[in-house]
Image (cartoon, rainbow, N blue to C red):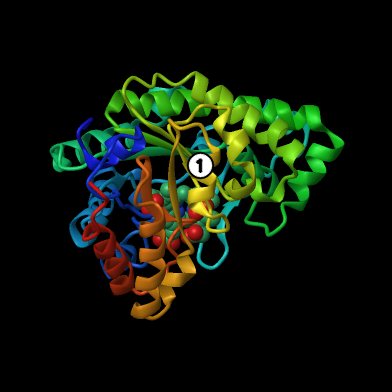
Amino acid sequence: MENSLFVKAAFSKKVERPPVWMMRQAGRFMKEYRAFRETYSFMEMMKNPELATEVTLLPVDLLGVDAAIMFSDILVTAEAMGGNLSFHEKIGPVFSNPVRTKKDVESLIFPETEKAFDYVFKMIKLVKQRLNNKIPLIGFAGSPFTVMSYLVEGKSSKDLQATKFLINTEPEIAKLLLSKIAKVTTNYLNGQIEAGVNAIQIFDSWANVLSWDDYDEFSHFYINEIIQNLNRKNIPVISFCKGSSVFASKMAQAKPDVISIDWNADLLAIKQQLPQKIAVQGNLDPFVLYGSKEIIQKKVLRILEKMRTESGFIFNLGHGIMPDIPFENVKFAIDLVKNFKNES
Ligand code: CP3
């Protein structure tokens, strides 16, 4: 897959147009996904390699994206460690046994990678067969900080009050938990590489609640540990966080190939501040996709034109697609990117 548009751009090589995919592309904004959900729960689909393969391929077939992302969730690492995970309509993920004390952390296990994530590795192999080298497959995991926040809170939370209480009262317990998650995540991602993914993305969706110093100490430190221990071979590593407009220079210290930028920053200004060999991904505000075609076109083209002379740019959103965004608007935005020409 070294010659695919996506991998070339991720390694900052010159491409005729930017590749495009969208975070959370394998999900509810497609009626075909919602049809599956009438029969199966999210967990049933994720744990079944055949069904997860079908969902992974939906946006490939329906949208013509330049990369597939495997259909799974960032919380599977926490579940494999002993978190009692379930998903609920309108509430989201719930861990019925929140982790708050040293004893709670100590009782989490180090799962056997091959056994615990067998269903994911099987799905990766199936997807690879079906893609038949047409486009690359992106594997992923959550960052230790973001995964910890779900384990500690027990359910989605707007301000991560319990997580911040833990790092401000018992930082050593938080660090014990973070380093446990980091080790499991490293093994999990290396297993995905072994199974055949063509790129890795690390999702740190909650980094934006942290101060600069706490981001360094409780998030960046563990992402760096994971990236340094990946068997990267010729596979690009993408680092995403909400808050990357602020944290990009710190994220660069972990030496990912690509940094995925939220929608707050001027993408070109960020690109120019980063080391030249680090590519950027982003950064359309996903809320634009609720808008009119005219304004979607204006805002997509604004990013494309701004980045026209840069190698090392992957078009994406600043965060994931929301479930009620109209499908045709997503398709419209993707086609705009696919019809764009970089300067030759
Ligand atoms: O990008 C993709 O489409 C691949 C699949 C994918 C899912 N979740 C499927 C999913 C990926 C990459 C994720 C990552 C994920 N999961 C993140 C990081 C990215 C981000 O958006 O910040 C986070 C924080 C989670 C945790 C999670 N999973 C939440 C909070 C929820 C419920 C709320 C929501 O966003 O839907 C989920 C469930 C989930 N994960 C669904 C899907 C398609 C919806 C399940 C359903 O009801 O059908």
- Decide which of 56, 34 is in the foreground and name it: 56
Lateral position of residue 77 relative to residue 69, left or right = right
* Point 30% across, 49% down: residue: 18
Residue at image mark 1: 272
Identity, as a three-letter code, of the amino acid under mark 1: Gln
Q: Residues within 10 Å of mark 1 (few under 14, many from 20)?
A: few
Is residue 108 visible in the rendered image? The answer is no
Number of marks in picture: 1
- Decide which of 42, 149 is in the foreground and name it: 149
- Decide which of 235, 163 is in the foreground and name it: 235
Query: Residue 242, how many percent across, how many down?
Result: 58, 50
Residue 309, compared with residue 250, is above or below; it is: below
Lateral position of residue 152 relative to residue 111, left or right = right
Query: Residue 252, how many percent across, how many down?
Result: 55, 32
Task: Label 1: state its secondary structure.
Answer: helix
Is residue 273 visible in the rendered image? The answer is yes
Q: Residue furthest right?
A: 169
Query: Residue 160, how many percent across, how many down?
Result: 72, 52
Lateral position of residue 263 relative to residue 68, left or right = right
Residue 18, compared with residue 325, is above or below; it is: above
* Point 32% across, 52% down: residue: 21
* Point 27% across, 51% down: residue: 342
Q: State which quarter of the image contains the N terminus.
A: top left
- Decide which of 323, 151 is in the foreground and name it: 323
Residue 165, compared with residue 253, is above or below; it is: below
* Point 56% across, 54% down: residue: 265
Residue 165, compared with residue 337, is above or below; it is: above
Query: Residue 282, how many percent across, how many down?
Result: 44, 52
